[in-house]
Each structure stands twice: as structure tokens, then as C-alpha cells.
Amino acid sequence: MDRAAAWAILTEFTHGDSLRKHARAVEASMRAYAGRYGEDPETWSIAGMLHDFDYEMHPRAPQHPMKGAEILEARGVSAAVIYAILAHADYSGMPRRSLLDRALYACDELTGFVHACALVRPGKVITGMEAASVKKKLRDKAFARTVNRDDVYRGVVELGVDLDAHITFVVDALTSVAPEIGLARTT
């Protein structure tokens, strides 16, 4: 499957702009990590793009992502991508075995959190965001309260990266797609 086919699946099932931006952001983070680890950027970016494609239809566990996995299998998405998508949900019972699985898990919540941090900055820009400011917001339980902080911390442990380095890496990845996800000055 190529990116265009994955995007077609995403847009068929995901109509909300916010969830599409999240998909694009996780895609960018996953593509960047694929480059870092010498993995296939198409496979990794497709996993990032499609990890929540079924969320509007099935916003509750256990339907998401299990029902979505059935759709992806019928559409010819690779078994590795489907497994990573299933493994990104702790309740799926699918252990994160591969680097792809662990990277998707590590990128999902943090990418959403970093995006939220950028939205409250002057001009809603991500450029120049520092890990220290993201970590400060992580300690504020009232900020972006739907983001599971335990998932963020567990993700860095499972991926075997330092939290500051992971935050900086995700910020850099999102900076590369900032105009597409609404985090760049338009003036």
C-alpha cells in the first residue's frame, strides 16, 4: 500500500479536521523515526496515518481499533501495520513486539500533546518549542487532560529513548509539516 491509498482510507472514514491533523502529525513523527532507525518510511508513516482512522466510527474500546483492523485487512494493509495499530491500544491484548509497534505507541499520545502545546503558544506555532516547556505542561494535569501521561512515559521507556530527546524529535517532525497541521504562521 502506498501513501495515496492510505490517505484515501483515512479520508473515507475520518471526516473531522482535528483527527485528520492528528493522523498527519503521527504520520510525520513515524516517518522521521523510520529514518532514524533505518526502517521503511512508507510502512511506518502509513501506520501513523491509519492508527486512529476508525475512531469516529468506533470511539470506544474495544471496538477501536479492533473493528478498524478488520477493515484494514480487507483493504490489503500489511499485517505489520495492522498489528502495530492493534498494539497501540493497551487493552487490545497485543504486546508491542517490534520497533514499529513501540514507535507508534510512543508517538501517538506525545504527538497529540505536543500539538496541544503548540496551539496555546502565541501565533499557534510549533517552531522553536522546547522540551522543557512541553514537560512543564505534562506536569499540569488540567492541560490537555485527555492525554494519558502514563502512556507518554511508558512510550519512551518501551522505545528506549530519553523523554527530552523524544519530545525534541517529535517537535522537529511536526515542524516539518506545520502548515499542514495548522501550526505555522500564515501571515
Image (cartoon, rainbow, N blue to C red):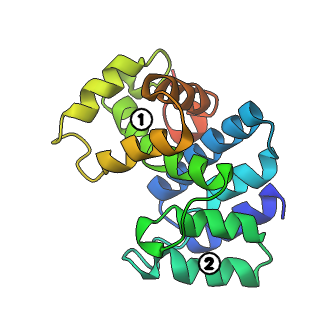
Q: Find residue 118 and report its horizontal and vertical position in percent.
A: 39, 30
Which amino acid type is shown beneath numbered disc 1?
A: Val
Q: Is residue 11 left or right of residue 182?
A: right
Q: Nearer the viewer, mark 2 or mark 1?
A: 2
Write the residue at 47% across / 14% down: 128
Image quadrant in which you'd find residue 10? bottom right
Residue furthest out toward the left = 142
Q: Find residue 126 and report its horizontal and vertical position in percent.
A: 47, 25
**Picture disc at residue 97:** none
Image quadrant in which you'd find residue 47? bottom right
> Height in image: 155 above or below 66?
above
SS type, badge 1: helix
> Height in image: 119 above or below 126?
below
> Height in image: 13 above or below 25?
below
Q: Find residue 14 and report its horizontal and vertical position in percent.
A: 54, 68
For marks 2 and 1, give the CA distance: 27 Å
Write the residue at 78% across / 69% down: 78
**Picture disc at residue 69:** 2
Which amino acid type is shown beneath numbered disc 2?
A: Ala
Q: Is residue 27 left or right of residue 20?
A: right
Write the residue at 39% across / 28% down: 124
Q: Which residue is mark 1?
A: 114
Q: Nearer the viewer, residue 93 or 59?
A: 93
Q: Is residue 40 left or right of residue 149?
A: right
